[in-house]
Amino acid sequence: MIKIRPARSQEDALVAYDLAYEFIAWLHERYPDMSHEIAHYLTHQKFDEQIRDVLVHYNPPRGECLLAYQGQEPVGILMLKDVGDGTCEMNRMFVRAAARGLGAGRALVQDLMERARAMGFTEMILGALPRHYEAIPLYRSCGFKDDDRAGDPGDTDKAILMKLVL
């Protein structure tokens, strides 16, 4: 059974760090042709700094970091950050291969949506690369729609932008 919990302790922060870097390794594996763009995005987003200080950057009231567990084993991560004007961004969704198909991704998204509403956000946005074959249908099934807004300057022009009214 999958359980979701927020990252609140230093131990949770270490788990989040490991899962976040597994996500980056997965990105490089799935998108070898975009290695330069991925590196640019990570630098622009100050990825390492934010992941090292996950309890500062991704905790209420301006953010969240959720961890998915199967038993005692961490299997997934999903983050949220405040981007202003009542809008938050869902990002860094990753589920380990061994837990895919068990509902961890859906549980993370649904829990994050509930927390975002409780934090007062009215809209959630995200960007996903086109070969996120597993995630894009999940996002759509959770109510996300295509979004024609301009992406973050650090995003690639290949990103699929989506939004959800909370």
Image (tube, helix red, strand yellow):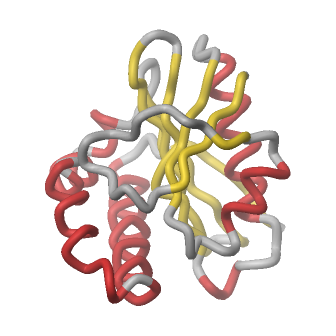
In this rendering, the answer to whether 91 lies above or below 117 is below
**Quarter of the view holding residue 135:** bottom right
- The residue under the point 39% across, 24% down is 83
Is 131 situated left or right of 12 in this image? Answer: right
- Tell me residue 44's x, y (percent): 17, 49
Residue at 54 percent of width and 54 percent of height? 160
Is the C terminus in the top left, top right, bottom left or bottom right quadrant? top right
141 with respect to 70 (left or right): right
Instruction: In this rendered view, identify the residue nearer to me: 10 or 135.
Output: 135
Figure label count: 0
The foreground one among 98 and 129 is 129
Residue 119 shows in the view: yes
Task: Work out which quarter of the rendered image holds the N terminus and state it.
Answer: bottom right
Residue 74 in view here? no
| Towards the viewer: 33 or 164 | 33
In which quarter of the view is residue 124 placed?
top right
- Residue displayed at 51% across by 20% down: 87
* Residue 62 location, quadrant: top left
Residue 161, given in percent of the width and then of the height, sits at 54, 46
Question: What residue is rendered at 65% in x and 38% in y?
Answer: 112
For the residue pair 93 and 139, the one nearer the viewer reads as 139
Q: Position of residue 7 (x, y in %)?
A: 47, 46
- Residue 14, image x, y percentages: 34, 62
Image check: 74 left or right of 92?
right
